[in-house]
Amino acid sequence: MAADQSDSTSPGAPPGPLLAALRRLLQPLVRLAIARGITYPALSELIKELFVEVADRDFALAGKAQTDSRLTLLTGVHRKDVKRLREEKSRSAHARMPRSVSLGAQIASAWSTRPGYVDADGAPLPLPRSAADGSEASFEALVASVSKDIRPRAVLDEWIRLGVVSVDDQGRVHLDSAAFVPGSGFEEMSFYLGQNIHDHIAAIDHNLASGAERFLERCVHYDHVAPESLPELARLAELHGMKALRAVNARAASPQTRGGDWRMNFGIYFFAEPLPGGSQEQQNAG
């Protein structure tokens, strides 16, 4: 069998398989950019800025000052642009978490972990709006325990609008099974786009490094799935995925894990789309 030429690139040439993977992962991002009015020149300038920023931060030589010329060599960005970008005021490398996300994540975490707020399986219990009925656990008490600067009614109204919670005919508040992942709310969803996709790709980047202890990065993928089976598979993925998320959330929120200066992220997703014509049948777990 002939050798795979995609792995036989000359020294310094971009690896073919990685370029193919980048092309594929960028397709939905380009689709999102076009849909939201972000043009190629705007995205190109952002990528140019990021190439210089990352090369400057992560590829410095020990004991040597980072020069514009070396950054041009590393990135292919013209030296005049490197100089300009380095002289401009540095922009934050991380999206600032919207306050609504920060506060909401704290409330949802407390609702999903505290005794009295979860059932025997660790699922969030439906809560009365207030403790007027004599119950110690209530939505108002939960919000007040996290922040006294915002009215529980304001949180409830916003979460109903976003689809984070629903209210049943008995007036009890139910947390959506997806926890704090708003179904609408552009600022919140944009934040999670940046955080979650960043962390997923960062885990893969880490795993590609030789000798590195690998992060969890697994998936189950099948071709030629009957479309009528997709709702059942989606429900199964959500059911067992949420069990895993609740277990990790409960442990991460416990006092034993707090007090350090690291962060972690563990996520679950499900996606389906029609196959392009002529695909070979594949069944994979990777």
Image (spheres, grey):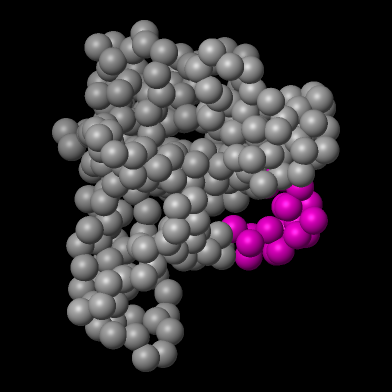
Res 141 quadrant in image = top left
Residue 127, percent from left and from top: 38, 32
171 to the left or right of 114: right
Q: Kindly identify the residue that appears in the image at 42 percent across and 61 percent down.
A: 9
| Residue 12: % across, % down | 49, 51
The residue under the point 46% across, 26% down is: 107
Q: Spot the residue most to the front.
A: 10
Q: What stretch of residues is rendered in magenta? A: 29-48
Q: Residue at x 27, y 26 (%)?
A: 250
Farthest residue in the left direction? 120
Quarter placement of the C terminus:
bottom left
| Residue occupying the far bottom of the picture | 278
Position of residue 29 measured from the top left corner of the image (x, y, whole percent): 59, 58
Q: Quadrant of the N terminus?
A: bottom left
| Residue at the image position 22 percent from the left and 50 percent from the top | 240
Considering the whole magenta stretch, tell me its main secondary structure.
Answer: helix
Vertical position of residue 237 compared to residue 161: above or below: below
